[in-house]
Image (cartoon, helix red, strand yellow):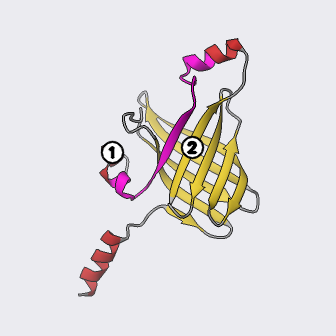
Amino acid sequence: MLLSASVYAQKALPNLHFAVDSKSFYAAGRWMPSDPKKKSDFPSETEINCDRQSMTCVEATAEYYSGHPHVSLDYFGIVKWDENGIIATSSSGICMTVTMLISFTDKSISATHSIKKMDNDLKEACKSLGASETMVDAFVVKNSERWNADPYGESIK
């Protein structure tokens, strides 16, 4: 009887990789284009760690493309952290500024990639890299319904 109750509880409340307390935030999952018609180009997995004292977030992403694994780190400065969530930004990229919005209530994360003001030569170079317009990505939290239903995630769980 206890075993069946435990199995039911695990199915009803999955172990989401989304945790927050008064000092830190952690999430694991993957970024997906918010437009459902678009798919990610490569399998990937991302972890986000935020520290309230230093007001910083670190995003680590592992991807597999061109036959090789790749790892990247991105750093964000926290603009706001309250009981509702976190707003963090990074302008370290050449072409775009990224604003990450973390909602504690919804257990959701989004990232808006906005084009920076730049001269025409740099604008053309950014276009050739696919950075020509504002884009929004949604974070799919590991073990969420969308994570478990997405066939792209099946290969990287």
Which of 6 and 71 lies nearest the eye of the viewer? Answer: 6
Q: What residue is pinned by disc 1?
A: 155
The residue to which callout 2 is attached is: 111
Residue 87, x across and y down, in percent = 66, 52
Q: Which residue is pictured at 69% across the width and 60% down the height?
A: 81
Q: Residues within 10 Å of mark 1 (few under 14, many from 20)?
A: few
Residue shown at the point (42%, 37%) measured from the top left: 35
Q: Nearer the viewer, mark 1 or mark 2?
A: 2
Instruction: Answer with the quarter of the image where residue 94 lies.
Output: top right
Q: Residue 52's x, y, as percent?
A: 71, 62
**Which of 70 and 31 lies nearest the eye of the viewer?**
31
Picture layout, residue 146 above or below residue 2: above
Who's the residue at 62% across and 42% down the image? 73
Q: Tag 1's secondary structure?
A: loop
Residue extent of the magenta highlight: 125-148
Residue displayed at 57% across by 31% down: 134
Amino acid type at image mark 1: Ser
Tag 2: residue type?
Ala
Decide: is 40 above or below 13.
above
